[in-house]
Amino acid sequence: MKLGRATGVALFAGALLPAQQDFSRSVAMKQLMLDLIHPASNEILLSVNRGGPQNDSEWAGVRRSALTLAESGDLLMLPGRVREQGDWAKNAKMLSEAGMAAYKAAESKDVKALGAVTDAIDAACTGCHKQYRPNVFPRGDGSK
């Protein structure tokens, strides 16, 4: 991010934002997961399990979902959401990378490549949920 000297604005992805933009007042983690990340991952996984997108409209839906996952890794790293830099950051990055791989597969309408990325999507979600949602994925050592 570059800061404009006299204007006090930040140049971010070609847009002008106030230099001290506070991104910590966004939606709660639960809403981010329920309304953005979970539906996007499900659309990709269900599409692959059903044999892959069958027409341009379905490919467009997968592209949108893949792009959502690719950008969601950054959303998970915004101030107020970062749990710790280790596994949280690793899983957020894994989600972004899996989303970009799915996006590239959808762009080229490559069902095989799209199928290959489903394990990475699942690993990113499961890795994070095992650590931060133990009620969903019990740790197996008796701890909660």
Image: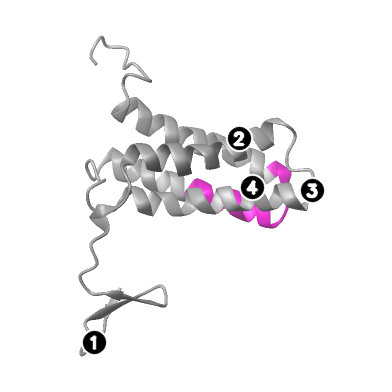
Could you say which quadrant of the image residue 87 lies in? Answer: top left
Give the foreground label among 3 and 2: 3
Q: What element carries label 3?
A: loop
Question: Who comes first in sequence, dot 3 or dot 4?
Answer: 3
Find the distance from the CA under tag 3 to the CA under tag 4: 11 Å
Find the distance from the CA under tag 3 to the CA under tag 2: 16 Å
Q: Do the residues labelled 3 and 4 touch (CB within 8 Å)?
A: no
Quadrant for the C terminus in the image: top left
Q: Is mark 4 on a helix, strand or loop?
A: helix
The answer to whether residue 110 of the structure is visible from this angle is no
Nearest to the observer: residue 93 or residue 42: 42
Residue 55's disc is: 3
Quadrant for the N terminus in the image: bottom left
Circle 3: residue type: Asn
Q: What stretch is highlighted in magenta?
A: 97-112
Question: Who comes first in sequence, dot 1 or dot 3?
Answer: 1
In the picture of the structure, the residue carrying the numbered disc 1 is 7
Q: Are marks 4 and 2 in contact (CB under 8 Å)?
A: no
The colour mode here is one colour
Could you say which quadrant of the image residue 14 lies in? Answer: bottom left
In the picture of the structure, the residue carrying the numbered disc 2 is 45
- In the image, residue 107 above or below residue 15: above
Examine the structure image and report whether residue 99 is included in the region drawn in magenta.
Answer: yes
Find the distance from the CA under tag 4 to the CA under tag 2: 9 Å
Examine the structure image and report whether residue 79 is included in the region drawn in magenta.
Answer: no
Give the foreground label among 1 and 3: 1
Which x, y percent locates residue 22?
23, 62
